[in-house]
């Protein structure tokens, strides 16, 4: 819930002229998430994510920025919030996971979030960099992004 609230706070802070609209859309998403967590209505989880993504998108469109430097943090918050909510729903079943499975899942989630954050931050940095540096730096940045994703995938497969 906190991860989703953080993503919404970012969107609301970014949307100056349509702050009420963004907050309203995001609040609907938070209500959906609350229903998922409190009542176990798992069908509402995708709609909670959609509402928060729409709120963030509206704030970006209204702001008019070509590259948002906070996008990696928002994406990571949404990823963690969705995964943890899904995990919460799975824990309600009669079959519980063994402690080693839980630890492996925590490590995999941490690697996924960290790798995604690092990769998306690198992509944003390359996209925001002035092209006056030349094609070599652009290609080097793209190669670094691909390498980072590859390392994250390899680490995730090794732990799974």
Image (cartoon, rainbow, N blue to C red):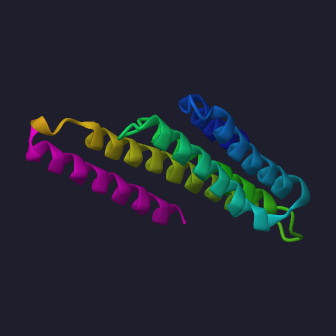
Asked whether, in this view, residue 137 is left or right of residue 43, the answer is left
- Image quarter where the N terminus lies is top right
- Prevailing SS of the magenta stretch: helix
Q: Nearer the viewer, residue 59 or 144?
A: 59
Report the residue that reaches farthest toward the bottom. 95
Residue drawn at (64%, 52%) of the image:
106
Quadrant for residue 43, please give it.
Answer: bottom right
Q: Is residue 74 above or below residue 150?
A: above
The answer to whether one can see residue 99 in this image is no
Asked whether, in this view, residue 49 is left or right of residue 127, the answer is right
The answer to whether one can see residue 56 in this image is yes
Q: Position of residue 147 (x, y in %)?
A: 29, 55
Residue segment shown in magenta: 133-160
Q: Position of residue 114 (x, y in %)?
A: 49, 45
Q: Position of residue 119 (x, y in %)?
A: 38, 48
Residue 158 in magenta? Answer: yes
Q: Nearer the viewer, residue 139 or 19?
A: 19
């Amino acid at each position: 819930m906190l991860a989703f609230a953080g993503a919404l706070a970012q969107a609301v802070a970014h949307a100056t002229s349509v702050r009420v609209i963004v907050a309203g859309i995001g609040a609907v998403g938070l209500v959906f998430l609350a229903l998922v967590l409190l009542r176990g209505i798992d069908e509402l989880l995708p709609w909670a994510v959609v509402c928060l993504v729409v709120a963030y998108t509206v704030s970006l469109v209204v702001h008019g920025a070509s590259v948002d430097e906070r996008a990696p943090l928002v994406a990571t918050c949404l990823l963690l919030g969705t995964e943890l909510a899904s995990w919460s729903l799975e824990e309600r079943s009669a079959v519980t996971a063994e402690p080693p499975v839980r630890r492996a899942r925590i490590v995999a989630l941490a690697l996924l979030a960290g790798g995604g954050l690092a990769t998306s931050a690198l992509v944003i940095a390359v996209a925001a960099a002035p092209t006056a540096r030349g094609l070599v730096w652009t290609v080097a940045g793209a190669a670094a992004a691909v390498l980072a994703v590859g390392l994250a995938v390899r680490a995730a497969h090794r732990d799974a």
